[in-house]
Image (cartoon, coloured by chain):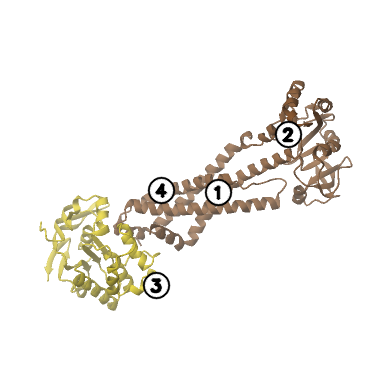
Amino acid sequence: MNNGAIIETRDLRKVYRVGQVDVPALRGVDLLVQPGEFLSVVGPSGSGKSTLFHIIGGLTPPTAGEVKVGGQNLAALSDGGRTRLRRRTVGFVFQKFNLLPNLTARDNIAVARHIAGLGAHPDTQFDEVLRLLGIAGRLDHKPNALSGGEQQRVAIARAIVNHPAILLADEPTGNLDSENSKAVLEVLRDLNQRLGQTVLMITHNPEAAAYGHSTVHMRDGRIVDRTG
Amino acid sequence: MTGKLVLENLKNRPLRSLLTILLIAVPVTLILTLVGLTQGMLADAQNRQRGIGADIVIRGSTTQAVTSFSGYTIPAPMVDKVQQQPHVKLAMGVINDRVELILALTGIDVAKFNRMTGGFTYDQGGPLQGADDILVDRLYAEEHHLQVGQTIKLMNHDWRVAGVIEPGKLARLAVPIRTLQDLDAATGMVAQIYVQVDDPANVDRVVDELQHLLKSYKVYTMAEITAMYNVDQIPAIKPFTVVVAAIGVVIGVTVVWLSMYMVVLQRTREIGILKALGASKAFILGIILAEATLLGVGGTILGIVFSYGAQWLIRTLVPASFQMAIAYGWWPRVAAITLAAAILGALYPGLSAARQDPIEALAYE
């Protein structure tokens, strides 16, 4: 495998068992993502995008094949090992924001640090990131007092507060209007350009995909094309 | 941060949290009330025995240790015989009849009673004069709304309230001994003899002499009698308390189980978020257990507050029939029982939360 890549998959397969039927979600995915790359993953529903996202993020193990993230072979990791991977190596941004509704934006960010064992308060450099995200003045509000765009930017802040090797974004603009979508995509691009944050973004939207350096097209559990 | 997460979760569902705390508080109150009643009533009976001013008590051989209700097995002439013993200052025979669960009507020899105890303190009215007169203590008068001059029916007999006395001297209800002996068809018999000696230093000597003299009776020092007013001396109380505590545990476990099960269902998505952030199974379990522990602490505190309410209600409604102490010594025990029940109840929901698949949890609507 290529040692320079931050994400490497080879013949990656995932089969879900639904009742008594095996449903293949990934049928042999080979993918290389270099550090600092902003990669968009597009494809129709059921093409395996989310499954790929879940395996790379350590949320579920692969059925077969190899997958390395930040040098760690995920296929060999136990549930506990994948849990540790999620603390610092990957950061997630979801379509539905997935902020903890009872906590303020500040505490939502602090929880991620707490779980990673880093102490609740981010380093001072993170203030710059918060300004970049445009949420510095909104941190003491709970999610229900924030707009969708603000919530997603808080979610991005939470995802990167532990300086993960990879930021995984699953349809990050799926629940946003075009103005907020643009703002969030620009934030992701800024994080990539200014901080060198590796970003892997799943999207249906070709305009959103265009923010990435390159785009991977998936269909029927396979990568069928890579452009850019 | 974990504490804040737990507190915010509890605050976010105030009704559920309060209802759970309330339901946990119920068995806590039950246990504390039961124990408080036992302690309060034993202490009250102890005080009333001490209030007589006797040093020795002679009982019939069939008398139960604490309740002192018995057949009238001691012939009245025995009182005079005791009176004649060396160092005996005064011997007084009494009889008792149960009129409520543990409330006795006591037949006294007024003259001797006054000499031994210094007499009753009267809130209203005055001493027993007629054969059908009765003295009721202030608590009984309050409970039954009695005034001097009123007639009450006890043991199928009409009694005229001659006076309302301060509690603390043997009887809540005192009547002339002769009348009660006649009503009981026990003329010339007494149930107990209270003995006052000339010098406290002579108590043991007099006890020995009386035991020698009255072989078929039980002779106790007052210290021995008051020591009998102890939970361990009442056969049914301990198992009863254990049963109530066990019911408390079952209620506590069930309430917390249901509550935390609902919490886990309602927060499935949040658990998924925490797992996506890298929260371990122990972290998730810890949050659920911490929340249950807080509910348990809340329930314990509320239960203790409610036990004060129960005491107030008992004092207000049935001050003569029941006395309830605040069972401070049981606070740590009920806290331990409640917390154990809360943790036990939260264990299954907590473990199922910890085992949740993060992808399924995140997809939960």
Q: Which is more toward the observer, B93 or B291?
A: B93
Question: In what element is the residue under mark 3?
Answer: helix
Residue B322 spot, x, y in % from top left:
69, 45
CB-based contact (under 8 Å), mark 2 and mark 3 = no
Question: In what element is the residue under mark 1?
Answer: helix
* Chain B as rendered: colour: brown
Disc 1 residue type (three-letter): Val
The chain under label 4 reads B
Q: Which is more toward the observer, A5 or B112?
A: B112
Q: Nearer the viewer, mark 1 or mark 4?
A: 1
Label number found at residue B28: 1
Disc 2 residue type (three-letter): Phe
CB-based contact (under 8 Å), mark 3 and mark 1 = no
Of labels 2 and 1, earlier in sequence is 1
Query: Do discs 1 and 4 share a chain?
Result: yes
Quarter holding the C terminus of chain B is bottom left
Looking at the image, residue B345 lies above or below residue B58? below
Looking at the image, residue A214 lies above or below residue A54? below
Label 3, label 1: how far apart the Cα atoms are: 40 Å
Disc 3 residue type (three-letter): Ala
The chain under label 3 reads A
Label 4, label 3: how far apart the Cα atoms are: 34 Å
Query: Do discs 2 and 1 share a chain?
Result: yes
Label number found at residue B347: 4
